[in-house]
Amino acid sequence: MTFPYKLIATDLDGTLLRDDDTVSERTRAALAAVTAAGAAHIIVTGRAVPWTRHILDDLHYEGLAVCGQGAQVYHAGERKLLTSLTLDRQLAGLALSKVEAEVGPLALAASRDGLDGDVLVGPGYRVQEGPLPAVFAKDPAELWSAPLNKVYIQHPDLDDDALAKAARAAVGNLVDVVMAGPGVVEILPLGLSKATGLSLAARRLGVTAADTLAFGDMPNDIPMFAWAQRGVAMANAHADLKAVAQEITASNEDDGIAVVLEQLL
């Protein structure tokens, strides 16, 4: 049995993961069938490695994963970072001052580089309930004291889309700004996206964009959809991603990935 794609790229939150952070048996079975048919499955997530590793372990995942919005290519089997791109902290500080000049004070969190990099949370930043560990920093200067792969920003009044739009307009070409999920707006190195990390990983696997089927749910998946041969948005996806998807499947709660893979099989 041949499968029409050599690479299946899946986002995690809102896509591969159900809302309780688990992967359904149906989706696991569909991915196992696809890999048995010769395709590779690669996870491409905004989460940095420390927030992704427990999920990879649960899936008995041994291959490459693209983490940190494309900043990190991680070999799960070897527990090794193959590539790691950091955010220029001076540029990020300048960009943030430009955003705050437009919209007022922001609450910040920062994701530190490395296999065991903590996420440091500054004063006023609202952390989502769940199992992901964060370290609360009483002194905002702590956020900047070690290499980072991204900075998270929140605003007391603006919603995610409005904050991302205002920040993008304010920062110009200093950094990139992406909306990656509910309550998750991120400052990234300029030019970094899931597509850059995925293309690096694909090259290592000997496959191309033309071989790739991608699944996602948020605006940070748009570059990945632009890169891949086919992009499939979940029913629960953000309108901006649905607008560029070639197909819309069922939601993450209703095994949307499995629905598509089973049809292709």
Image (cartoon, grey):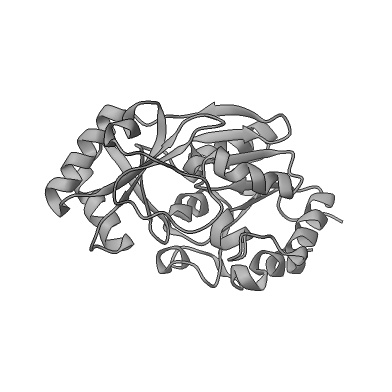
Q: Does residue 5 lie above or below 171 as drawn?
A: below
Quadrant where the N terminus is found in the figure:
bottom right
Kindly give the residue lying farthest to the front in the view shown: 138
- Residue 7, image x and y in percent? 68, 48
Looking at the image, residue 126 sits to the left or right of residue 12; the answer is left
On the image, which quarter does residue 235 sit in? bottom right
Residue sitting at the far right: 1
Residue 183 image offset from top left, x and y in percent: 38, 59
Q: Could you say which is closer to the camera, residue 219 or residue 149?
A: 149
- Nearer the observer, 108 or 16: 108
| Above or below 206: residue 32 | below
Q: Residue 68 placed where, x, y %?
A: 49, 41
Place of residue 100 in the rendered image (x, y in percent of width and height, measured from the top left): 17, 47
- Which residue: 65% across, 45% down? 54
> Where the C terminus falls, by quadrant?
bottom right
Q: Is residue 135 above or below residue 125?
A: above
Q: Residue at x 63, y 42 (%)?
A: 53
Q: Is residue 68 left or right of residue 28?
A: left
The residue that appears at 48% across and 36% down in the rendered structure is 118
Res 181 seen here: yes
Residue at left offset 70%, top offset 70%? 259
207 displayed left or right of 156: right
Q: Quadrant of residue 116?
A: top right
Tell me if residue 6 can be seen: no
